[in-house]
Image (cartoon, rainbow, N blue to C red):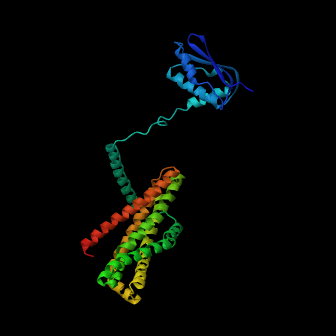
């Protein structure tokens, strides 16, 4: 068996210290520490050179390199020159390679404690920076639309068709379920109160106006924000990680026109159609409650809905759906284009896209409601 690693220290000259290595320097056994050399240096003043004698060294692995790196750090701190000539040739090369790569300055940087005011200031700065990025992205989108109107936009029509299918027909099942249940819930809640006054027939008015004017568009927008906005962000974020967007820029193709514009057009076209379908499903849900719970006839419910819902209500709902579609597309594409270069950044971009789209839908709903109230419609 090979003897375990051993080390001894001699002083061949007044300004030099010799480290004699012997035995087997391999991980798994107890190896001498660099602290022993440090203690020897403290007992010998004026040492400016550290040399090695490895003629009795039988075997070694990375355990020896770790020891040598610790000695290298110690010599650097005490301004002692380390001479690797007496080491095995392989160890000399590895030591030279390890010493040539400087340690990253912030590799061991501890997490700094930020005060509340500092945190508040950083969040405020990030908020205004994000608004600037949002305005810049919207400006680029407007330019892309203007180029589309002039027939100069660069994107594949086949991609537009596939995206329309993805955001349209493939979204029907989830939109059907959500809007049917929303209409059913509205009718059930309204029926409880209206039965107290014997006005059950007005459940049709409640469900029809609520769904056609606002609720169908909001629920469809939120569903598309979670389903499509997050998907857009993940798709573009993955392209950002794989440097495909950089490749488009290198080829002289605008990512805004080639990637963002088809997605924005698809949602802007399909969202009003999805809202129409959501109106039907919501009214159908309300009708189910009215017919089976309130004993209201089918034709009676239908006539009351037709009388209650006007074209203005339908127009406001379709316009809201168009706005929500543009918001969802812009939020998803913007977060995807801002994605970092890691897998975790793709997930963060998808989450941020959903949150941004939902906040945008709620804010735009409030703005549209105030404008309609001001106009008296």
Near-viewer residue (83 or 249): 83
Residue 54 percent coordinates (x, y): 67, 21
Near-viewer residue (224 or 208): 208
Looking at the image, residue 211 lies above or below residue 16: below
For this orientation, the residue located farthest to the front is: 196
- Residue 252 visible to the viewer: no
Give the number of callouts: 0
Question: Residue 332: which quarter of the image?
Answer: bottom left
- Residue 134 visible to the viewer: yes
Residue 276 percent coordinates (x, y): 42, 77
Residue 150 percent coordinates (x, y): 42, 67
Looking at the image, residue 110 lies above or below residue 196: above
| Residue at 64 percent of width and 31 percent of height | 62
Can you say which quadrant of the picture contains the C terminus? bottom left
Can you say which quadrant of the picture contains the N terminus? top right
Q: Is residue 206 left or right of residue 244?
A: left
Residue 253 percent coordinates (x, y): 49, 57
Looking at the image, residue 144 lies above or below residue 85: below
Looking at the image, residue 184 lies above or below residue 152: below
Near-viewer residue (375 or 230): 230
């Amino acid at each position: 068996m090979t003897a375990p690693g051993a080390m001894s220290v001699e002083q061949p000259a007044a300004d030099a210290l010799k480290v004699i290595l012997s035995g087997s320097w391999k991980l798994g056994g107890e190896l001498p520490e660099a602290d022993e050399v440090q203690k020897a240096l403290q007992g010998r003043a004026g040492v400016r050179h550290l040399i090695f004698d490895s003629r009795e060294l039988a075997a070694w692995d990375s355990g020896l390199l770790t020891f040598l790196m610790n000695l290298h750090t110690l010599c650097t701190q005490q301004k002692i020159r380390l001479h690797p000539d007496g080491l095995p040739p392989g160890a000399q090369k590895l030591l030279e390679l390890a010493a040539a790569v400087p340690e990253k300055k912030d590799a061991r940087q501890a997490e700094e404690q930020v005060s509340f005011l500092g945190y508040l200031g950083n969040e405020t700065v990030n908020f205004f920076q994000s608004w600037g990025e949002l305005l810049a992205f919207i400006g680029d989108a407007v330019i892309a639309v203007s180029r589309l109107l002039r027939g100069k936009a660069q994107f594949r029509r086949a991609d537009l068709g596939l995206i329309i299918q993805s955001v349209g027909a493939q979204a029907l099942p989830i939109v059907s379920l959500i809007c049917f249940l929303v209409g059913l819930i509205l009718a059930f809640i309204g029926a409880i109160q209206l039965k107290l006054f014997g006005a059950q027939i007005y459940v049709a008015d409640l469900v029809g106006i609520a769904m056609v004017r606002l609720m169908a568009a909001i629920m469809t927008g939120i569903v598309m924000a979670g389903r499509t906005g997050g998907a857009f962000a993940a798709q573009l974020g993955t392209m950002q990680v794989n440097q495909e967007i950089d490749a488009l820029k290198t080829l002289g193709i605008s990512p805004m026109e080639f990637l963002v514009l088809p997605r924005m057009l698809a949602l802007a076209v399909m969202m009003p159609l999805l809202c129409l379908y959501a109106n039907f499903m919501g009214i159908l849900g309300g009708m189910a409650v009215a017919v089976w719970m309130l004993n209201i006839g089918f034709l009676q419910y239908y006539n009351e809905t037709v009388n209650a819902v006007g074209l203005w209500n339908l127009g406001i709902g379709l316009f809201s759906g168009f706005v929500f579609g543009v918001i969802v597309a812009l939020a998803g594409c913007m977060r995807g284009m801002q994605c970092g270069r890691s897998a975790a950044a793709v997930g963060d971009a998808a989450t941020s896209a959903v949150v941004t789209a939902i906040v945008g839908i709620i804010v735009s709903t409030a703005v549209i409601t105030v404008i309609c109230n001001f106009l008296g419609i």
